[in-house]
């Protein structure tokens, strides 16, 4: 069972906090190889995996070839434009295909969301580390 530690980071509300950040790899259709991404936020409140444009540009030739969507999060009247691509993700030795929202912005945090991604695992958050195991 893979184990992922929390990492300390700055918070404008609380100073220093710990966040459940994981390492994963995404298969690049553009580079024809696995691309590792570190410190991706495991977010049980996120419907979909999300990557900023720069990361997305490593994975596909043109992010705009995906399905255009506008999403919103904690601020209900603020929308983020981007494109959904079905990409192959690998965590430890588990590979799966999941929808990934590639934002048309650099100002977003990489997120590991639920649909066809985190929902494939049993996750336990205990404040010191994150255990993720296959269901």
Image: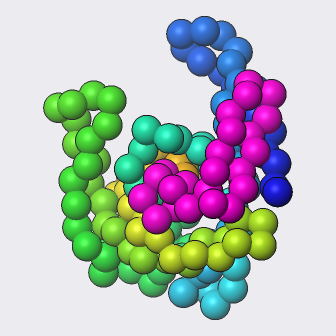
Percent across and percent down for residue 83 are 31, 67
Left or right of residue 2: residue 110: left
Percent across and percent down for residue 37 are 68, 60
Give the farthest residue toward the bottom: 32
State whether residue 3 is above or below residue 53.
above
- Scheme of colours in the image: rainbow
State whether residue 122 is above or below residue 64.
above
The answer to whether one can see residue 53 in this image is no
Q: In which quadrant of the rendered view does residue 13 lie? A: top right
Q: Quadrant of the C terminus?
A: bottom right
Q: In which quadrant of the rendered view does residue 82 lie? A: bottom left
Q: Is residue 15 magenta?
A: no
Q: Quadrant of the N terminus?
A: bottom right
Q: Give the extent of the magenta segment.
A: 113-135
Q: In which quadrant of the rendered view does residue 79 lie? A: top left
State whether residue 116 is above or below residue 38.
below
Identify the residue shown where x is 60% and y is 72%: 89
Left or right of residue 28: residue 4: right
Identify the residue shown where x is 47% and y is 71%: 98
Identify the residue shown where x is 22% and y is 61%: 69
Percent across and percent down for residue 7 are 76, 33
Give the farthest residue toward the left: 77
Count up the numbered dots: 0
Identify the residue shown where x is 31% and y is 37%: 73
| Front one among 47 and 107 | 47
Q: Is residue 134 magenta?
A: yes
Percent across and percent down for residue 10 are 66, 21
Give the farthest residue toward the top: 14
The answer to whether one can see residue 5 in this image is yes
């Amino acid at each position: 069972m893979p184990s992922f530690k929390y990492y300390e980071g700055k918070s404008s509300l609380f100073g220093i906090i710990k966040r459940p950040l994981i390492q994963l790899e995404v298969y690049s259709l553009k580079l024809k190889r696995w691309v590792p991404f570190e410190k991706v936020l495991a977010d049980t409140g996120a419907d979909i995996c999300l990557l900023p444009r720069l990361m997305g540009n490593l994975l596909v030739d043109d992010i705009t070839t995906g399905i255009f969507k506008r999403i919103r999060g904690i601020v209900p009247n603020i929308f983020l434009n981007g494109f959904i691509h079905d990409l192959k993700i690998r965590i430890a030795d588990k590979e799966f295909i999941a929808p990934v929202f590639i934002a048309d912005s650099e100002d977003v945090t990489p997120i590991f969301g639920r649909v066809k991604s985190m929902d494939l695992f049993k996750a336990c958050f205990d404040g010191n580390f994150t255990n993720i195991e296959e269901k």
